[in-house]
Image (cartoon, helix red, strand yellow):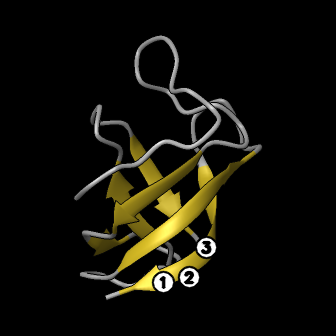
Amino acid sequence: MAARMNAGAIAGAGRPAVGDELVLRVASLAFGGDGVARTESGYVVFVAGGFPEMSYTTRFTPGTSLTIRLLILASTS
């Protein structure tokens, strides 16, 4: 699972900042159908519409303090 940061930097203990773009590989599905992936620093994130074993270019969107959801910008196999 490769992660590539664009303009936004991942700060602090690995929590991504709103607007950061990363390339992530979805490992599994969560209850409710979101894909589950990890950032390079190990932070668990949910990819809306993501399928296991697929890689996506994603953008972090505002979420609750406990979850981070990502929008898919592009898909790669």
Nearer to us of marks 2 and 3 is 3
Q: Judge by depth and name the residue closer to the eye, 65 or 20.
A: 20
Q: Amino acid at mark 3?
A: Ile
Q: Is residue 10 left or right of residue 61?
A: left
Residue underneath mark 2: 49
What residue would you read off at disc 1? 75
Residue at 51% in and 67% down: 57
The residue positioned 26% from the left and 55% from the top of the image is 2
Q: Secondary structure at mark 1?
A: strand
In the displayed image of the protein, which residue is found farthest to the top? 12
Label 2 to label 1: alpha-carbon separation: 11 Å
Where does label 3 land, which residue?
72
The residue positioned 63% from the left and 33% from the top of the image is: 8
- Asked if marks 2 and 3 touch (Cβ < 8 Å), the reply is yes
Q: Earlier in the sequence, mark 2 or mark 1?
A: 2
- Is 13 rendered above or below residue 73? above
